[in-house]
Image: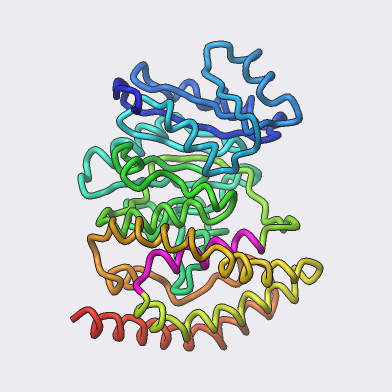
Amino acid sequence: MPPTVEMRASLIIVTYNNHSQIEACLRSVLPSLSPADELIVVDNASEDGTAALVEAAFPQLQVLRASRNLGFGGGNNLGARQARGEFLAFLNPDTTVELGWLDALVRTLQTHPQAGMATAKILLLDDPEQINTCGNEMHISGLTLCRGMGQPRGAYPDLDEVGAVSGAAFAMRRALFERLGGFDESFFMYMEDTDLSLRARLAGWRILYAPEAIVYHEYRLTFGPNKTYYQERNRYWMLLRTFRKRTLAALLPALLLAELVTWGFVVLRERRNWGNKVRAYRAIVREQTALKRARQACQALRRVSDSQLLAQAHFRLGYEQTGAGLLPSMAHWVFDPLFWLAKKFAQGTSKLLCA
């Protein structure tokens, strides 16, 4: 049984080898908490003394030590099981916050009863005048990109509905989190925030961007040895369990175009790890039994049609977020019209099939 709800908000921060970042994060966070809020730090078996640092510097905090690295989703789920708040907030350990950021997220949910999740305005810690993301945008293929990346701080000043939260800083209703079953721990890392957001939208909830919730994020585009594997495996898993089979068939042109884009990216930027794409395909084939169960659980949440979900999806990809030069412009010129047609086809077909 979950603990009794007694608090306004429970803030959960999952750490893994964040010794150099966590103290600054916590010192910025603590003044923003009210007496009705609690802070839970989950350490995913760090090897650099992160947990010991937090316990020594902040003895008033609750630190949950996982016996192994549970991943982003698993760590947050562990924290959520101990939380007592009506709202759950999630924050990356490589962030700092402005006063009022949590109040803004909670207030957004309190004043918009149809909103299940609220995401912050996230600026670059190393360049606070530039946006990291103002909510995330989900592409028709499931690829997800930062909304407003690189734009000036003053952009996106208004409350808005978005396709997905950024896992770096967001809040949601605890009751919704529990109904969705929390984060999918099989993802381990990457795409967990998009998947949770898509399931919330499938269940009929809106996702809002709260511009008054200001967070600074130490963000750098990096390419670890397994990043492509997890991103692609998790993207396929998310799509296959969320959309009806007939919608997936209608999405096939968009998904094939996305394969050209992702394989092109691998060849240009991840050539040493090209096998990760193949590993992702194999994982989906190997996990069919688990995927079938996940589909059943996901479809039980359904309150909106696939065509409604597709209406919020974007057809443009932010190729410039992966690098500058002529290539991103050429990619827009080639792929934007094709993805636009693919989206129209998928939407039209989905509406006909659901009629």
Residue 286 in picture, x, y percent from top left: 59, 66
Q: Is residue 240 magenta?
A: yes
Coloration of the structure image: rainbow
Q: How many marks?
A: 0
Does residue 134 appear in this view? yes
Asked if residue 219 is among those painted magenta in the image, a careful observer would answer no
Placement of 350 over or under 163, stated as above or below: below
Q: Which of the image's four quarters has the N terminus?
A: top left
Check the picture and name the quadrant holding the C terminus. Answer: bottom left
- When asked about the image quadrant of residue 140, the answer is bottom left
Nearest the viewer among 173 and 226 is: 226
Does residue 269 show up?
Answer: no
Q: Main structural element of the magenta stretch: helix, strand or loop?
A: helix
Answer above or below: position of 37 versus 127: above
Q: Position of residue 181 (x, y in %)?
A: 38, 45
Report the side of 270 relative to 100 (left or right).
right
Along the line of sight, the residue nearer the viewer: 122 or 315: 315
**Residue located 56% across and 48% down the image:** 129
In x, y percent, where is residue 271?
78, 71
- Spot occupied by residue 49 in the image (x, y as percentages of width and height): 73, 24
Magenta span covers which residues? 229-244
Q: Residue at x 46, y 83 (%)?
A: 252
Q: Determine the residue located farthest toward the front in the rendered image.
A: 289
Q: Say whether residue 351 is left or right of residue 28.
A: left
